[in-house]
Image (cartoon, grey):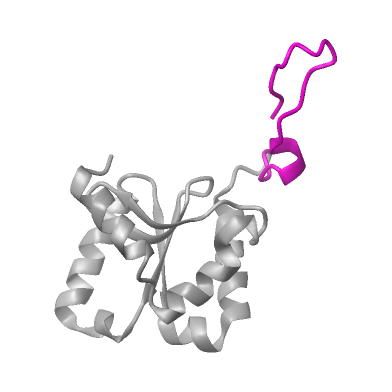
Amino acid sequence: MADGKSYERAKAFRKALTPPEARLWLHLKERKLRALRFRKQHPIGPNILDFFCAEAALAVEVDGSGHEHPEQAVHDRRRTVWLNARGIRVVRIAARDVLGELEGVLGFIAQVCEERLPSESPPPSRRLRRRATSPSDDGEEIG
């Protein structure tokens, strides 16, 4: 569970996406990628993930050139170990790839999500998530 500071930082980060993050978000939001729900700048513990899909327990990090510095690489590895210990897989995508190879990036993210989803329960379609009533019309939600 994230602390109050993480929530406040995440809220500020959501308003200040980098251009590669904003470009990727256009293709992840509103379940545009395989009907999966992604959250942007999502806090988990002390970390704020660029994008997170809870259904697939997947964090997608868009890394700019700053992540190539040795100190940042050590921090990134430590963070990945922490998230992996909680069952979250982390994929790191270079910002330049989001800008220059977006279709390939989206295909890769979709593939990783599919590998992590239980095979017997594909992501729900939008129609099934809408409120539906049972035949007895007692207002019971289905889906």
Quadrant of residue 127 in the image?
Answer: top right
Q: Quadrant of the C terminus?
A: top right
Name the residue rendered at 66%, 44% in the picture: 119
Magenta run includes residue 137: yes
Answer with left or right where residue 68 lies relative to residue 98: left
Residue 81 visible in the picture: no
Q: Nearer the viewer, residue 15 or 85?
A: 15
Left or right: residue 78 compared with residue 95: left
Chief SS of the magenta region = loop
Residue 16 vertical position relative to residue 137 in the rendered view, above or below: below
Q: Which residue is at a point 29% across and 61% down the rendered structure image?
A: 12
Residue 74 occupies quadrant: bottom left
| Coordinates of residue 18 in the picture (x, y in percent) | 38, 77
Is 79 magenta? The answer is: no
Q: Which residue is drawn at 72% across and 16% down?
A: 139
Position above or below: 27 against 63 = above
Q: Can residue 39 be seen in this view?
A: yes
> Which of these two is toward me, 63 or 88?
63
Q: In which quarter of the image is residue 103?
A: bottom right
Residue at the far right: name it. Answer: 135
Q: In this view, does 67 lie above or below 5?
A: below
Q: Where is residue 54 in the image (x, y as percent from the top left)?
A: 48, 46
The correct choice, above or below, for 87 with respect to 80 in the image is: above
The quadrant of the rendering that contains the N terminus is: top left
At 60% from the left and 52% from the top, the residue drawn is 36
Which residues lie in the magenta part? 121-143
Numbered circles on residues, count: 0
Report x, y in % for residue 43.
Answer: 32, 51
